[in-house]
Amino acid sequence: MARPPSARDFAQDVDEAVFDAVEDIPPGRVSTYGAIGRLIGVGPRRVARALSQGGGAVPWYRVVRADGSMAEPVRARQAELLAAEGVPMRNGRVDLAAVVWP
DNA sequence: TCTCTGACTTCTA
DNA sequence: ATAGAAGCCAGAG
């Protein structure tokens, strides 16, 4: 639709970029909020927000914190899903050195 | 307009 | 390794 860009459209575009980057993560690998945010050009909190809103359509569980830990609300579920993909974990934290995705 | 909050990160002690 | 503080981005009241 020919229509002047608005702030809301821009935000939606950023969300798409986040989802695209998350979908691009191969199975058995994980990435971090900060890494994705830097690739896209937004802050890590913006990535987390995008996933919390519409992460249901993407492998959000392949996104973990910078230190390998996971978000509280989904921590148990995420650990289960990652373990199912063969992601090595250590005391509740993902072994980023082994599965981190550039 | 201001303030609070959140699936975050990084620095310093 | 743990803890506290500052920074950053966007939505809700």
Image (cartoon, coloured by chain):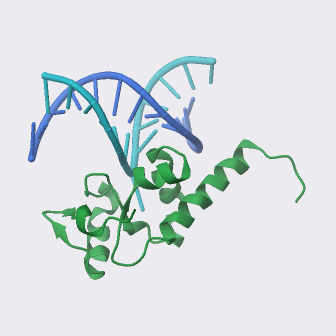
Chain colours: A green, B cyan, C blue
- Residue A25 drawn above or below residue A47: below
- Residue A62 drawn above or below residue B11: below
Of residue A45 and residue A27, the one placed in the foreground of this image is A27
On the rendered structure, is C4 left or right of A32? Answer: left
On the rendered structure, is A35 left or right of C13? Answer: left
Residue drawn at (61%, 61%) of the image: A16
Residue drawn at (46%, 55%) of the image: A36
Snapshot quadrant of residue A93: bottom left
Q: In x, y percent, where is residue A27?
A: 38, 78
Residue A54 seen in the figure: no
On the rendered structure, is A68 left or right of A20? Answer: left
Snapshot quadrant of residue C11: top right
Residue drawn at (19%, 69%) of the image: A89
**Quadrant housing the N terminus of chain A:** bottom right
Q: In x, y percent, where is residue B6?
A: 40, 46
Residue drawn at (48%, 49%) of the image: A38
Of residue A48 and residue B13, the one placed in the foreground of this image is B13
- Residue A68 drawn above or below residue A28: above
**Quadrant housing the C terminus of chain A:** bottom left
Residue A96 seen in the figure: yes
On the rendered structure, is A59 left or right of B9? Answer: right
